Amino acid sequence: MTAIAAVHTPEGYILSADGRQTQDTVTNDETVKIFHSFPRNSVVAWGCYGAVEHTFTVFDSFDLAVVSLAASKQIAGCDFSSLEDYAMKMADCIHCVLSFYYLKHSAIINLSEEYFPGLVFVGYVKGKAEQVKVEIRHCDRRWLSPSKAAFTVYPSGLAIGYGPKVDDYPDKAGELHAPKTLDKGKQLTEGYIQLCIDALGEHGPIGGRIHSAAVTPKGFEWKTKPKGFDD
């Protein structure tokens, strides 16, 4: 499981995620789930959830982070009318890779719902601030075309890209209005993820290092860096 949350402020977006990767048990607490690219006249960041990594055979594996980065490079030279246009083009590339794996291997694994790959995008295309979520679901042993999905949005503007809905947050924390600065936005998104970690316990499916990034019209900046990134 993953927790990804975003919020828009007058200064830009904050996108945060937990760092835990699980396959039955915890396998990594330093997984990077947030990435970024700079397509034409745009600044885009995205977070991965669902099938972040899933092994199809002993020899082959599908790593959503790796594939999404490759997809972003493949479409980097394209023109986009909106962030949704960017997100759907990238999801189409990922869908092609998934379909290839399923054609390649005759023994198709029936994945449970938690393994639907999904991507949460925030950023600016042609200067317009947008947030978009897309998922690639499966049915009858085949991958369906990518589709737009909905965020859970609180009155404060906190948008849960993926993760449990927490009924008393952020209202209980007094955050009834959208934060005015990136720092306040970071507190809001990281506070939500930490609440998920506390609620699910030390060995729960959400945990590890929380990492956060700011996405503004000027560019991408880590606010809380994943382990191993240079200062």
Image (cartoon, helix red, strand yellow):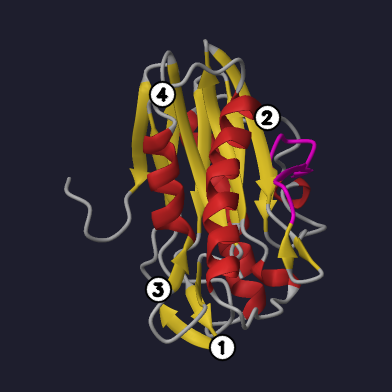
Q: Amino acid at mark 1?
A: Asp
- Residue at disc 1, secondary structure: loop
Determine crowd level at label 3: few under 14, some 14-19, many 20+ residues with C-alpha closer than 10 A. some
Q: State the image coordinates of residue 151 (x, y, percent, origin top left).
A: 75, 44
Q: Amino acid at mark 3?
A: Asp
Residue at the image position 53 percent from the left and 85 percent from the top: 203
- Are dots 2 and 3 in contact, CB under 8 Å? no
Q: State the image coordinates of residue 32 (x, y, percent, origin top left).
A: 39, 58
Q: Residue 12 bears which disc, if any? A: none
Of callouts 1 and 3, the N-terminal one:
1
- Are dots 2 and 4 in contact, CB under 8 Å? no
Q: State the image coordinates of residue 152 (x, y, percent, origin top left).
A: 78, 47
Of callouts 1 and 2, the N-terminal one:
1
Is residue 105 visible to us here? yes
Given residues 76 and 231, the one toward you in this image is 76
Q: Amino acid at mark 4?
A: Pro
Q: Which residue is mark 3?
A: 29
Residue at the image position 72 percent from the left and 43 percent from the top: 174
- Whether residue 25 is in magenta: the answer is no
Choose mark 4 or mark 3, whichever is in front.
4
- Whether residue 153 is in magenta: the answer is yes
Q: Which residue is mark 1?
A: 24
Determine crowd level at label 2: few under 14, some 14-19, many 20+ residues with C-alpha closer than 10 A. some
Given residues 25 and 225, the one toward you in this image is 25
Of callouts 4 and 1, the N-terminal one:
1
Question: CA–CA distance between discs 1 and 3?
Answer: 14 Å
Determine crowd level at label 4: few under 14, some 14-19, many 20+ residues with C-alpha closer than 10 A. some
Q: Which residue is mark 2?
A: 178
